[in-house]
Amino acid sequence: MCGIIGIVGKSDVAAALYDGLTVLQHRGQDAAGIATVDGPRLRLHKGNGLVRDVFTPPEMSRLTGSAGIGHCRYPTAGAESADEAQPFYVNSPYGIALGHNGNLTNAEEIRQQLFAQDRRHINTSSDSEVLLNVFAHELAIQDRLDVTRDQVFKAVAGVHSRCRGGYAVVALVLGHGLVAFRDPHGIRPLVLGQRWTAQGMEYAVASESVALDILGFELLREVRPGEAVLIGYDGSLHTRQCAEAMPAPCIFEYVYLARPDSIIEGISVYQARVRMGERLAERILQLRPDHDIDVVMPIPDTARSAALVLAARLDVPFREGFVKNRYIGRTFIMPGQGERAKSVRRKLNAITQEFKDKVVLLVDDSIVRGTTSRQIIQMARDAGAKKVYFASAAPPVRYQNVYGIDMPSSQELIAHGRTKKQVQTLLGCDWLVYQKLGDLVDAVRGERADLPRFDTSCFNGEYVTGVETNYLRELELSRSDEAKEARRLSG
Ligand code: AMP
């Protein structure tokens, strides 16, 4: 879960990168960084914290240059230390800065190859540094002083053949241009836009189209799975398919991660969520045609779009029962289960009058650990609800995400190895209803009938790239609360 952006403009781009990162902030609040190219110089500033805290006016004024990339990070692999903030930089060949959203599932194997065969040292546990060094090595072996377009595309093809997993990448190659690419499955999103100025055309790439919107760039299209885009510092745009495209975009972007005003793969995230609400309503009507629901309430904020149409379909009033403190981060961010549990009540408060003596259907986008849901259900009861039903716009989350979404280890997922009935008992609600996976896929696909499949691994354990059991086992250990806490304490 990270946000990336890159711009090649006609004047300084640091301020635009900063603005772009602030609307991608929901993708990662842990660290931020910007790198710009000013003639022969690469300028870089990064650190831990929100975009607004990492960059102060003096630092912004140092980031000169009409091309640059930005990154905001939510740690999914590696330690949570400031050394892992992105972009990463290597001085050879040419000087390259790179920012990455996603996760490599064969990072360990490549790390060893890089050391043993390519004689490259990786200084952090971040797979983005691994990816940067693969790209650098693939460029270096072409062994020419002046890098050509063809060589850049060949280097990206080299990355595709060595790196497995989900990755969307922006990189600055000194003396040449901005390179952006996605893995052959296009698991993580990346869009391309253009903006006409008096000095000529400017191009931008970003994780989500919302970043293009606020900067006045027109959305051209997705960077295709397996495709690379090269924007020369002279403003020229070149693209090449570097690996066969096998599209399987991550469905969790639509469920939870992306902003509703973004368009991913030509699908409006908001409309996908509306369709999820419609499908869920159909399922409720099918399971309980004579339901006794008095009122439908969203768990703010993501579920609101689905809950609103769900209420309309059920012909039941839609009411806001919970108010969210928007000055507090997502509860997931708190390290350790104890802290996380406490923070839900700090984040949400109930409007008691809306619950009194009512049969309430609470709607959330997904149930992950169940921590939030359990407390919210209790809050609804404390507020006087007669019965509390709970609907999830996504199917049960049962498996780890290996492609860059920060999910806990499977053992910490409430639905892992449990039936719906068992989850319902653990949550303490009177009825629990989940979206069916087929319905979720249809709801997201919408008009894009040509999209053959999505990555739905956290729901069904089917990983589009294939993953070794060993890798899953190790990830399981490194993602547990215990492991995260140990890393936090060791700094
Ligand atoms: P819980 O079931 O207590 O883990 O919380 C589920 C809620 O967390 C859902 O309502 C989502 O809004 C949100 N959520 C889902 N996935 C994630 C994630 N990967 N990181 C942070 N929050 C998430």
Image: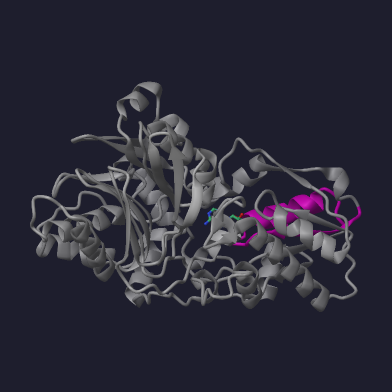
The answer to which quarter of the image holds residue 276 is bottom right
**Residue found 56% across the figure and 41% down from its top:** 329
Q: Please give the range of residues in magenta.
A: 357-385
Name the foreground residue: 472 vs 139: 139
| Relative vertical location of residue 18 with respect to residue 343 in this rendering, above or below | above
Left/right of residue 82 with respect to residue 431 in the rendered view: left
Name the foreground residue: 235 vs 283: 235
Q: Quadrant of the C terminus?
A: top left
Residue 16 in the image, given as x and y percentages of width and height: 44, 35
Q: Is residue 395 visible?
A: no
Point out the quarter of the image occupied by ligand 1.
bottom right
Left/right of residue 194 with respect to residue 129 in the rendered view: right
Residue 252 in the image, given as x and y percentages of width and height: 54, 63
Q: Is residue 77 visible?
A: yes
**Residue found 79% across the figure and 66% down from its top:** 430
Identify the coloring: one colour
Residue 359 in the image, given as x and y percentages of width and height: 87, 60
Queried whether the magenta region covers residue 337, the answer comes back as no
> Furthest-top residue in view?
58
| Relative vertical location of residue 333 with respect to residue 112 in this rendering, above or below | above
Name the foreground residue: 147 vs 93: 147
Left/right of residue 190 with respect to residue 314 in the rendered view: left
**Residue found 35% across the figure and 21% down from its top:** 58
| Relative vertical location of residue 45 with respect to residue 95 in this rendering, above or below | above
**Residue found 80% across the figure and 77% down from its top:** 287
Residue 76 in the image, given as x and y percentages of width and height: 40, 55
Left/right of residue 393 with respect to residue 480 in the rendered view: right
Question: So how many labels did they put on this image?
Answer: 0
